[in-house]
Amino acid sequence: MTASPAAEATRRRTFAIISHPDAGKTTLTENILFAGGAIRAAGQVRARGENRRTRSDWMKIERERGISVSASVMTFDHDGLMFNLLDTPGHEDFSEDTYRTLTAADAAVMVLDAAKGIEPQTLKLFEVCRLRDIPIITFINKMDREAQDPFELLDEIGSKLALDPAPLFWPAGSGGRFKGMMDLRAKTFLPFIMSSVEHPAPIPFDSNAVDAFLSSAERTEVEEGGMLVSEAAKPFDVQSFLEGHMTPVFFGSALRRYGVNELLAGIGAYAPPPRPATATRSGQPTHIAPGETEVSGFVFKVQANMDPNHRDRIAFLRLASGQFQRGMKLKVQNTGKQLSVNAPILFFASDRELAEEAFAGDVIGIPNHGVLRVGDSLSETGTVRYSGLPNFAPEILRRVRVKDPLKAKHLKKALEGLAEEGVTQLFRPILGSDFIVGAVGQLQFEVMADRLSNEYQLDCVFEAAPYAEARWLTGATADLDDFSNRHKSAMAQDIDSALVFLGKSSWEIGYVDERFPKLEFHRTKERG
């Protein structure tokens, strides 16, 4: 018999992995799955050609470049807990996809390169976590290469992120001198073997067995470092971590599969289960507890053509309450449409299996043909609405046209599909027949061109648009009409038919903002 929704929710650990590109996030993801027993072989990340396709990178452009540009979800059962690992894009051009994925996470693992410390993209992603008050676990990776002094790394975490670092382990050297690490809580030593991905079991630090791995000078160095950091750093406090003030720090080498088991155990022990979520029910603000009987959740991602053999379109639904069962009927809050969820999917990257049941904290895939979009809230009554999934004003705007004019209708459908997924944003100027697409970075346009070509067989050209910035407009209808009539050539609608002003420069945005004080010009817009 299945436990209650509340008891099942407490078994869930839904976490995201964030890092600067090349800090080793994909390798760590792969080896967490291996450590959790979810895959039989890890290490494909290092292989060449087709083998470089890791479990979490399934899009063609990802495999060719060896980067992650699309968030994916992997679910596995380990040590009595159900883990939902949300793998986010590492590339900064996909920060919006990362932001939306973090809305579905209860905790984040921040991966730092031991030699480089906190890099610009890490800082950006950390700020996104802070906006959402997500507790952060730190994994300092690549200790098998020359690294910064660990005290300097801890200082950097404290000063740049305003977080109290609480190391749970202390490393013995780095690079060629890296011999392992001491567990500061259990006072054991975890030996590291450079030539292997199998490492000896932990041994008591004060036993003679340590002599087989450390010289007396190395032993003294580790012991003194451990004592010093234990006195200097605040002791790890779970409550302070959950409130976002403190980060437990782990060390290791994802490539050598070292420290990964300890990290996974730490996620299980300290990362929070699903917590009550802020929402409205029938328009009234409320908090919805994971153990509530009504099934509810929100769509944080839509992905088309995960399986190129079937023109599929999957909505990723993060469940927030209740016990979901296959075949259930759920209503979309903003449209009132009812869905019979007969083929829900549990993800393992691009592999999938039918989900017979799921609970708060789980992420299930709902196959649909354009019914669900990012930001939609689903529930049994259709009265629950979750917020916090914004669109951000794009940083680059491009005009897009298809080389074959007979395919203009296909282009419209394809662009709308990609905009619904959140790949890019689509603006349709009120005058003329152009399509204007917006993105955070250049790589998004490359992914877009790649997908338009491969999935829709459309050969497209992206040209410079006469606009530099976009702002969503709100205000009284008469004021909006007046403004639109005066600036017809700069007015557009987004995919939801919301009014958008396309400015030629940030100066022009500031100018019209001053001249029309009754209107509001927004950099973000709530989705759904």
Image (cartoon, rainbow, N blue to C red):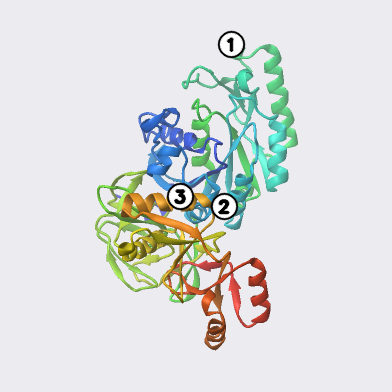
Q: Residue at x 58, y 46 (%)?
A: 136
- What secondary structure is marked by label 2? loop
Q: Nearer the viewer, residue 200 or 161?
A: 161
- What secondary structure is marked by label 1? helix
Say which residue label 2 marks. 134
Q: Residue at x 51, y 56 (%)?
A: 96
Mark 2 Cα shell of 10 Å, populated few (<14), some (14-19), many (≥20): many
Residue 343 location (% of width, % of height): 25, 55
Instruction: Give the label, 1 or 3, closer to the camera.
Output: 3
Q: Residue at x 38, y 33 (%)?
A: 37
Amino acid at circle 1: Ala
Q: Nearer the viewer, residue 305 or 344?
A: 305
Q: Earlier along the polypeptide chain: callout 1 or callout 3?
A: 1
Cα distance between the residues tagged 1 and 2:
41 Å
**How many dots with numbers?**
3
Residue 407 location (% of width, % of height): 31, 62
